[in-house]
């Protein structure tokens, strides 16, 4: 089982963007996720067909990155943790850059990050 889990966008005004997608596209936001150590905040917006959009902001992101806002990642859910590890092994063996080793992140999700052939971040997550 593999499916697109979410698309992540870096945004400047988290609450304004959340309100836009709720008002005009019928999205429902989860509670704000906040990691004070990384100065990171996000909302997962759920749409009618259970598609997710992750809106994210990160402290001084505009100062850190030239192209700071817009698409951040495409996330796939592949099954359990072992499935994440197997797929990441295959991608590594094929020569793709693993930029986030498999790990449990702040919200408890198990994920790893690889770059596709054009350098886009792809998150591989466990269900």
Image (cartoon, helix red, strand yellow):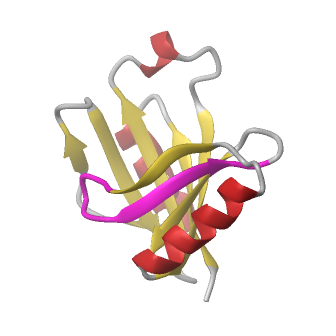
Specify whether 121 is left or right of 124. right
**Residue drawn at (44%, 63%), measured in percent from left and top?**
45
Q: Residue furthest left?
A: 36
Tell me the quadrant of the picture where the C terminus can be found: bottom left
In percent of width and height, residue 101 lies at 46, 50
Q: Which residues are magenta?
A: 104-116
Instruction: Between residue 67 and residue 49, name the one nearer to us.
Output: 67
Specify whether 124 is left or right of 44. right
Instruction: Between residue 71 and residue 38, name the one nearer to us.
Output: 38
**Residue drawn at (43%, 82%), measured in percent from left and top?**
80
Vertically, is 2 above or below 19?
A: below
Q: Residue furthest front?
A: 93
**Residue drawn at (52%, 60%), measured in percent from left and top?**
53
Taking the image as drawn, is residue 47 in sight? no
Instruction: Between residue 38 and residue 48, name the one nearer to us.
Output: 38
In percent of width and height, residue 82 lies at 45, 78
Tell me the quadrant of the picture where the N terminus can be found: bottom right
Vertically, is 56 above or below 19?
A: above
Instruction: Quadrant for residue 34, please give it.
Output: top left
């Amino acid at each position: 089982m593999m499916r697109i889990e979410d698309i992540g966008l870096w945004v400047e005004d988290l609450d304004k963007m959340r309100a836009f997608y709720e008002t005009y596209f019928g999205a429902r936001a989860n509670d704000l996720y906040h990691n004070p150590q990384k100065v990171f905040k996000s909302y997962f917006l759920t749409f009618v067909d259970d598609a997710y959009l992750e809106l994210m902001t990160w402290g001084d992101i505009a100062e850190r990155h030239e192209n700071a806002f817009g698409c951040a990642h495409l996330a796939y859910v592949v099954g359990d943790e072992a499935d994440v590890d197997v797929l990441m092994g295959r991608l590594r063996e094929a020569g793709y850059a693993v930029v986030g080793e498999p790990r449990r992140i702040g919200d408890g999700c198990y994920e790893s990050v690889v770059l596709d052939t054009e350098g886009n971040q792809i998150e591989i997550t466990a269900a």
